[in-house]
Image (cartoon, rainbow, N blue to C red):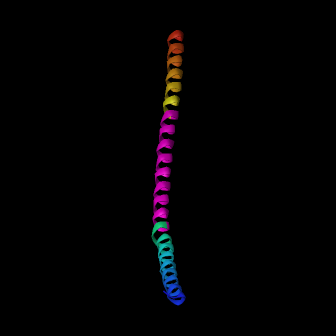
Amino acid sequence: MTDSEKLDIILSKLDKLENDVTDMKLTLENEIRTNIQHIAEGHLDLSRNLHEALKIDHEKEMLAIRVNVLETEVRRLKDRIEQIA
């Protein structure tokens, strides 16, 4: 095998390698990056939904506390009225 033939083989392999790298870059940019963005957006939606659900639970807890306080106040008022009457 001559040096020229070796060089041709090396150049051919280099061209194939460049094409493979270009294909990988295109796949990364067009498919993988886009898919990651879709997954990230879905994660953000789930996070927002969880935050909203927890907010509602927090509001329920606050309402339950207020109801307990109001029930106690009503009970005290009833006791006072009964003492006066």
Please tell me which residue lies in front, 32 or 68. Answer: 32
Residue in the image at 48% along x and 72% along y: 24
Instruction: Tell me residue 9's x, y (percent).
Output: 49, 84
Residue 68, above or below 34: above
Please tell me which residue lies in front, 36 or 47. Answer: 36
Instruction: Tell me residue 33's x, y (percent).
Output: 50, 67
Instruction: Tell me residue 20's x, y (percent).
Output: 47, 76
Residue 19, above or below 85: below
Magenta-highlighted residues: 33-62
Residue furthest toward the front? 1
Does the segment drawn in magenta span residue 6? no
Residue in the image at 51% along x and 46% along y: 51
Residue in the image at 50% along x and 51% along y: 48
Please tell me which residue lies in front, 42 or 69. Answer: 42
Instruction: Report the magenta stretch's main SS.
Output: helix
Does the segment drawn in magenta span residue 57? yes
Residue in the image at 52% along x and 34% along y: 62
Number of on-image labels: 0
Please tell me which residue lies in front, 52 or 44. Answer: 44
Instruction: Tell me residue 38's x, y (percent).
Output: 46, 63
